[in-house]
Image (tube, grey):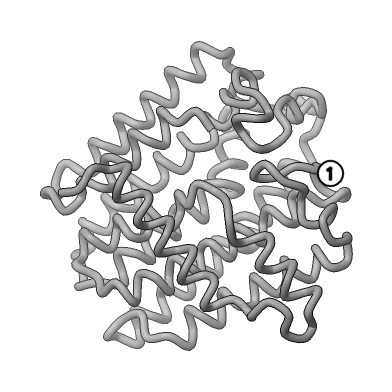
Amino acid sequence: MTDFQDWARLVAITMEQTLSSLLPTSGSNPQRLHDAMRYATLGGGKRVRPMLTFAAGLVADADIDRIKVASAAVEMIHAYSLIHDDLPCMDDDVLRRGRPTCHIEFDEATALLAGDSLQALAFELVSTHKLSDSAAAQLKMIQIFTRACGSHGMAGGQAIDLANVGIAITLPELEFMHMQKTGALIRAAVLLGAQCGQPLNEQAMQHLDRYAKCIGLAFQVVDDVLDCESNTEKLGKTVGKDQDANKPTYVSLMGLAPAKQFANDLLNDALDSLNSFDAKADRLRQLAEFIVSREH
């Protein structure tokens, strides 16, 4: 097996090529909108969600072409969510991935439409490409994907986040919010990757789902820690925004050291959920370690 960092770079290169080929071409009409879609999606990001889709696909011996399409759809949804999160009506941020946010580089209306268009294109991909030998299984994939994006997923989590600025909430309430806002798409990335391959039994899918839930929450806990400990140059986005906006975070509710311990506990739970899998799940194990130990 190749080194994890080499594998991660290969996935990033593959995703850049795949996304570039699936997005509208630069300069095609409407030019400004298509350029904004490409700007927000290409040339940056850790590509954690596509890596999770690729890694879960390995567990199920999935065809690489199916995984590439599913991963691209997931990453387009992620890019759309970042565009909208950064808008003045949401988090009002000017920096993303080390460069101006989409609405700063273009304008608010174009950014809004770019996000809308990326979401639509993502669903076009998962509904028009053959991602499973079973039509029923592919329909299930679309349902998982849809739920991850809507009011019971990312959009709902963002609504809860905005509604709780400056309000004291409990840890269970914070967890519920982030299981939707951050965790839902991470969970979908894993489940879609697994369902691109050979059918897994219900118990195996439940173990993968448990892994995804744990690592999705751990991702957010680490984000909260980095928002306190890192810097804007390293993260590529403005640090301290949550604290300045008086938003509830794991650090504000638990303290820095307990939040770090909680991330490690979630890592151990995620790894335990993979105990029934063989070496095919090693990339998922390595990704869990990477997500919790990352510095940006």
Residue at position x 49%, y 37% in the image: 219
The percent position of residue 55, horizontal first and vertical second, equals: 30, 55
- 104 relative to 289, above or below: below
| Residue name at image x 60 percent, y 30 percent | 234
Residue 281, horizontal then vertical, whole percent: 20, 50
Quarter of the picture containing the C terminus is top right
- Give above or below for 143 relative to 204: below
Q: Residue at x 48, y 88 (%)?
A: 128
Q: Is residue 59 left or right of residue 209?
A: left
Q: Is residue 241 above or below residue 8?
A: above
102 displayed left or right of 82: right
Q: In the rendered structure, which amino acid carries the disc numbered 1?
A: Asp
- Circle count: 1
Q: Toward which corner of the image does residue 195 lie, by quadrant?
A: bottom left
Dot 1 falls on a residue whose secondary structure is: loop
Count residues near mark 1 (Cα–Cα under 10 Å), then give few for <14, some for 14-19, many for 20+: some
- Residue 241 point in image, percent of width and height: 76, 30
Q: Nearer the viewer, residue 100 or 264?
A: 100
Q: Is residue 209 above or below residue 236?
A: below
Question: What is the residue that sits farthest to the left in this orientation?
Answer: 278
Foreground of the two, 171 or 182: 182
**Which residue sits at x=52%, y=77%?**
21
**Residue 124, percent across and down?**
56, 82
Q: Front-most of 257 and 71?
A: 71
Dot 1 corresponds to which residue? 92
